[in-house]
Amino acid sequence: VEGDRRREGSMREYVKLSMLTMGGMYLTNYSLHYLSYPLRVVFKSSKLIPVMLLSVFYLNKSYTLSQYLSVALLTVGVVVFTLGDAKGKAYFNPKGIGVILIGSFAEAMAANFEEKRLFNQLGCTASEVVLYSSLIGSVWAVAADALTGELLPALYHSADHVETVPIMVMASVAGYVATNAVLVIIKHFGATAAEIVKSCRKITTICISFFLYGKPWTLCHLAGG
């Protein structure tokens, strides 16, 4: 049907979304210049909290006390569980805290923006949002890599190790499927529900790695679970 192919969201909306998404990803990764990996894990695993808070102020949603407590318990459990896989001594620089906080809130804002503006107000499809946000986001990613001098080394590495290219393609396809599924959840159930699913996914990923790679269980895994 021709009407189904029409883009519902404007390019301006997708530029905003791609900047929030790309900015959040870049800043949380850049924070490793100042923070240890375990501390980054704590902040990444706590992203459910800013998503929920922004949904209160940006989407005017309300939650019961039991829902707030449930989110707090889930967040603590995910943090403790994922720290069982984080190696390295915890250290931090105040700059890193600021960087990762901005990145976390940018990602949280992106999820709530998708729910309110793109899905509720404009009625965009999940496939459309994935297509245009990823297309524009790739431009920001290439520009950032070029400015930091990481673009050419990455291209040379792929040329020297062509066996990595199919792996990257498969990872991209899997990422597309996962992102599309998350956006469908945001559209029908909200950003907070989607973030809860993503938090549970982190635990599932680590559990699968136990069976695939024979990794040992730790007290953090047991306590977090």
Image: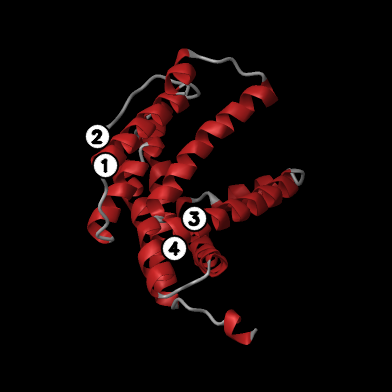
| The N terminus sits in image quarter | bottom right
Q: Disc 3 designates what residue?
A: 185
Q: Residues within 10 Å of mark 4 (few under 14, many from 20)?
A: many
- Distance from label 3 to label 2 (Cα)? 35 Å
Q: Relative to the observer, which residue lies in front, 30 or 17?
A: 17
Q: Which residue is at 50% across, 51% downward?
A: 149
> Along the polypeptide, which appears first: circle 4 or circle 2?
4
Q: Disc 2 designates what residue?
A: 94
Measuring from the top left, give residue 128's x and y in whole percent: 54, 70
> Along the polypeptide, which appears first: circle 3 or circle 2?
2
Q: Disc 1 designates what residue?
A: 98
By what rule are the colours in the image chosen? secondary structure
Q: Disc 4 designates what residue?
A: 18
Marks 2,1: beta carbons within 8 A: yes
174 on left or right of 44: right
87 on left or right of 40: right
Q: Residues within 10 Å of mark 3 (few under 14, many from 20)?
A: some
Residue 135 occupies quadrant: bottom right
